[in-house]
Amino acid sequence: MKDRDRENFQDQERADILLVVNMFLTGFDVKKLNTLYVDKNLKYHGLIQAYSRTNRILGELKSQGNIVSFRNLKENTDQAVALFSDTNASEEIFIEPYEYYIEKFNDGVQELRAIATIPNDVNKLISEDDQVEFVKAFRNLIRLQNVSKSFTEFSFSDLNLDEQTFEDYKSKYLDIYDRTRSKPDEEKESLVEEVDFELELIQRDEINVSYILKLLANLQRDIKDDATQEDYQNQKASILELIGKEVQLRSKRDLLEKFIEERLPTLEPEEKVETVFQDFWTPEMLNANTKLYISSYTNSKKPKIVNMTSSPQTNEHN
């Protein structure tokens, strides 16, 4: 079973549900396990061991697990925690109810709106102090949303911020990150630079290059099928918007957009998008890295060693 938890395992090959009778609970350790359903009178070390199966943290992406009990194990749980942990450890071991995090999130929305009423208002935050204030406020919402999503009853309708607006704010959040990291070294001493953006918090649903290529293949098919110009432009805009929201792909946006504009319309029916993109990617990256090398040399800095032939990973992964 542990083999199925490896990073290179495909989602469809992972176990979705396991029915466990007894001892397997104490030897099964999969960090991606999120929910444990209990229908047994567990107690003491057996209870702690069972609960621990789903409480294996996964960085910032998973800070706790869910226990759904079909029996009243409140007293047994309190006894086990008191026996095997500090007597006052319950507040640290058990997270707050779902409503607590929803209330905290909605309070955070008010704080965010006070800084930037709508996502486009983030563009008006000129001073670094204001930008840092926005980053910290939205980072708090990301943290609270991640915890809230671990509850089975989570719904965006409970939040005072709809999903699209949240994504729009997230895009502005990433814009600030990109601008800060793209500055020359001599200009990087700033308040924003010192802030931890905790990007791992927003990499829960990774959109990789392989997925984008599938969308491009559909876009190419629509070109060949004489789709209306409006439909084509809408689909293209959706793909570019998706790239802009995904942390791992934002740096590749310019090249992907160039591929869509220049190469995609000329694809022949027998050509595969994946192969053509790889052929397009390599010389473009070589050209970009060469310019970077020349720029570093011209500025009398020690040239950086760069990988001149690396291509994007197109393997499906979680």
Image: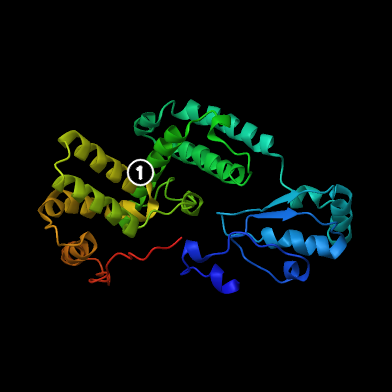
Residue 304: % across, % down: 27, 69
For the residue pair 38 and 318, the one nearer the viewer reads as 38
The residue indicated by pointer 1 is: 175
Tell me the residue at 39%/35% (across/down): 127
For the residue pair 216 and 143, the one nearer the viewer reads as 216
Tell me the residue at 85%/47% (across/down): 72
Q: Is residue 201 left or right of residue 127?
A: right
Residue 35: % across, % down: 66, 54
If the image is split into quadrants, where does the N terminus sit? Answer: bottom right
Tell me the residue at 32%/58% (across/down): 209
Q: Is mark 1 on a helix, strand or loop?
A: helix
Residue 245 at least partly seen = yes
Residue 290 at least partly seen = no
Tell me the residue at 52%/37% (across/down): 137
- The quadrant holding residue 59 is bottom right
- The quadrant holding residue 281 is bottom left
For the residue pair 190 and 227, the one nearer the viewer reads as 227
Q: In this view, does 278 lie to the left or right of 76?
A: left
For the residue pair 23 and 91, the one nearer the viewer reads as 23
Residue 130: % across, % down: 44, 34
Query: Which amino acid type is shown beneath numbered disc 1?
Result: Asp
